[in-house]
Image: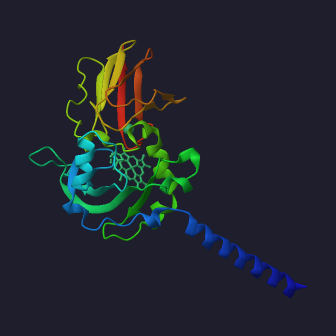
């Protein structure tokens, strides 16, 4: 009896493995998005300073892809977009240091993320999080698959999904060269800019009842999320959009970005 059970079990496992192998052949995924050899000789179409994770990032595409998009064409089939991620060098206080042009300075390489668009590639992605015909993959700096990130590839699709109206390319403004003409930085009492994944100023002081207005300067969306007895979330703000809150009670309120929890700010409300 015991022996019989064992045999049944091993047969079932063999069956499952065979089915899994067949599935893997039919499904397009991170394994099909090759490491972009020599990408650092392609066109760097954007540089990015991320305060929230203290990273400096470079975004690359082949010159013919950048050219096509800058001519007003859709992102071509076969396009490969790459981000090279580096730790930002920091001063003694942990503040990222900047070069003469204002960019963070490259530290240790952290990884390479890739998205690639090929006709038919989206068909094997569940409709609920399909990104057109894009597929995603993450690599270590030396070009080995980042197994941990690739195991949760759905996370890549889900975060890019709200950007469907720009073909899921969050940095499309950089790719198309329309990044200039950037959103206006707000000023005045109660005005907070969200730029480079940083709330500026990080600490804002207002009188009770006075309005605090956040304006998003970044290409990436953000969301003010005030933590307290009950969490208060503003709508997600896209580039150029603003959102406001008023506090009637005196006190100090800490807040974060609902999309990038590494972004922190503070509201001080006085009488
Ligand atoms: C938390 C949301 C989020 C997740 C998860 C995410 N991305 Fe992105 N991605 C962004 C943002 C924001 C940008 C714009 C550039 C930046 O901020 O680095 C971006 C840009 C990119 C770009 C450059 C082209 C573009 O769309 O602008 C690539 C390539 C990319 N991501 C790949 C990936 C891969 C691969 C994964 C999964 C391993 C992933 N992303 C997961 C938010 C996300
Ligand atoms: Cu944010």
Q: Nearer the viewer, residue 108 or 34?
A: 34
Q: Position of residue 118 (x, y in %)?
A: 42, 56
Whether residue 58 is visible here, answered yes or no, is: no
Q: Looking at the rendering, in which quadrant would you find the N terminus?
A: bottom right
Image quadrant in which you'd find residue 242: top left
Residue 43, position in %: x, y? 20, 54
Q: Is residue 185 above or below residue 145?
A: above
Which percent across, then down, holds residue 131?
47, 47
Q: Which residue is painted at 48% across and 56% down in the image?
A: 121
Residue sitting nearer the eye, 230 or 99: 99
| Total residue callouts | 0
In the rendered structure, the answer to whether residue 32 lies left or right of residue 213 reads right
Screen quadrant of the C terminus:
top left
The coloring applied to the image is rainbow
Q: Residue at the location (46% across, 51% down)?
A: 133
In this view, the residue farthest toward the left is: 100
Query: In the displayed structure, would residue 13 be above or below residue 95?
Result: below
State the image coordinates of residue 55 (x, y, percent, origin top left).
28, 52
Which residue lies most toward the bottom here? 3
Q: Is residue 77 visible?
A: yes
Tell me which corner region of the image, top left, top right, bottom left or bottom right, holds residue 5.
bottom right
**Residue at x 47% of width, y 47% of height:** 132
Which residue occupies 40% across, 12% down? 209
Q: Specify whether 196 is left or right of 11.
A: left
| Depth order, front residue of 83/115 | 115
Left or right? Give the position of 171 relative to 17. left
Q: Quadrant of residue 225?
A: top left
């Amino acid at each position: 009896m015991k022996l019989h059970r064992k045999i049944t079990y091993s047969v079932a496992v063999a069956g499952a493995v065979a089915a899994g192998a067949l599935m893997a052949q039919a499904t397009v995924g991170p394994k099909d998005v090759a490491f972009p050899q020599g990408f650092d000789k392609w066109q760097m179409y954007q540089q990015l300073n991320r305060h929230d994770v203290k990273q400096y990032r470079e975004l690359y595409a082949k010159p013919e892809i950048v050219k096509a998009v800058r001519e007003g064409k859709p992102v071509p089939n076969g396009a490969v977009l790459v981000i090279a991620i580096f730790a930002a060098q920091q001063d003694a206080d942990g503040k990222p240091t900047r070069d003469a042009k204002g960019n963070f300075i490259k530290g240790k390489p952290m990884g390479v993320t890739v998205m690639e668009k090929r006709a038919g590639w989206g068909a094997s992605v569940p409709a609920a999080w399909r990104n057109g015909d894009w597929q995603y993959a993450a690599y270590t700096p030396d070009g080995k698959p980042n197994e941990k990130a690739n195991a949760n590839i759905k996370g890549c699709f889900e975060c890019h999904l709200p950007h469907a109206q720009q073909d899921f390319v969050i940095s499309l403004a950089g790719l198309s060269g329309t990044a200039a003409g950037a959103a206006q930085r707000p000023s005045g009492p109660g005005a907070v800019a969200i730029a480079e994944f940083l709330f500026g100023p990080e600490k804002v002081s207002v009188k009770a009842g006075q309005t605090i207005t956040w304006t998003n300067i970044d290409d990436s969306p953000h969301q003010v999320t005030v933590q307290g007895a009950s969490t208060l979330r503003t709508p997600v703000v896209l580039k150029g959009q603003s959102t406001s809150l008023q506090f009637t009670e005196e006190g100090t309120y800490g807040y974060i970005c609902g999309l990038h929890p590494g972004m922190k700010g503070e509201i001080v409300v006085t009488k």
